[in-house]
Amino acid sequence: MQIGLIGLGKMGIHLAQNMLRNSNDVVAFDLNQDAVKEAGSYGAETAFSLDEMIEKLDTPRTVWVMVPAGKPTDATMAQLAEKLSADDIVIDGGNTYWKDSLKHNRLLTEKGIHFFDCGSSGGWRGALEGGNFMIGGDDKEAFERIRPLFEGIAQKDGYLYTGKAGSGHYLKMVHNGVEYGMMEAIGEGFEILEASDFDYDNAAVAKLWNHGSVIRSWLMELAQDAFEKDPHLDQIQGRMHSSGEAHWTIADAMDHNVPTPVIYEALCARFKSMQEDTFDGKVVAALRNGFGGHAMDKAK
């Protein structure tokens, strides 16, 4: 199928390659012209303005938005509401706050445009090789039009239509809260090992734990990768940056009187890491860099 892809950052450029590899025709647009040219080198049709991208799409159009949450996504949705036509489809694959997705849904559906909020997991590797997608949207019939797209770009059993608008990004928000807790537990575990009286090979421990143990996971694989490159993570600071999803999760849990002590403590650990250096913070920073390419602060 044909897709207009807006946003060619570290997720979008890999997603474009995944779409192309799965027999989709991609019309790629980004404000960064070099990123557009790169997408063109992979076989995408290039567009150097939003209007050009829309003109190159057959109707009814399908547009996937992969830009930063907040004002960039708000501005993009406002432009699409004015420029697209009834029965077109817009997919927001970014980390948008779910209440903003409800606002975008109202804006677009007033124009007869179908809106889907798509929580995307798996980091840049997933975007490239087969991701995990949580897709909300009010029109199940319209979703069937884009189901073949997800069949191709997701891992097997790696996508789910979750129901009404907002539910996709809500599910991704909770997913990220769980992710915070898991990474914090891994970081604390390795900090205990680092402080112990024993001389552990951290990479070997991570490899061991990832082969048959109860806590085997992709995060443990990423920990092994990080320790193989830097055995005691001496090259980075233990500063765990936070992008907001756990904060949203905790706030909504409080609205529903649901206790979330693990996710709350994981978020507090990130705040504390901005004040002091910890080995726990080094581990989590390395994990975030491994799956999402998030920036790490180099050791001074």
Image (tube, rainbow, N blue to C red):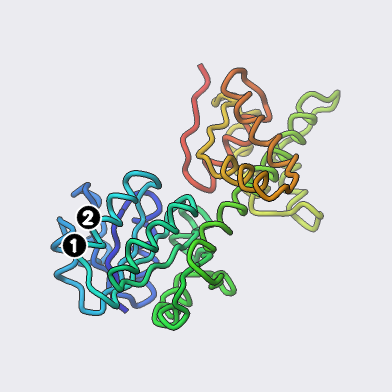
Picture disc at residue 206: none
Residue 142: give x, y in percent of width and height. 40, 80
Residue 259 rendering spot, x and y as whole percentages: 75, 44
Q: Quadrant of residue 113?
A: bottom left
- Identify the residue shown where x is 37% and y is 58%: 104
Which residue shows up at 81% across the image and 55% down it?
A: 214
**How many numbered markers are drawn?**
2
Q: Is residue 11 left or right of residue 81?
A: right
Q: Position of residue 116 (x, y in %)?
A: 42, 67
Q: Is residue 253 above or below residue 242?
A: below
Residue 146 lies in quadrant: bottom left
Q: Residue at x 76, y 27 (%)?
A: 194
Query: In terms of secondary structure, where does tag 2 sit?
Result: helix
Dot 1 lies on which element? strand
At label 2, which amino acid type do we have? Val
Dot 2 and dot 1 residues touching (CB under 8 Å): yes
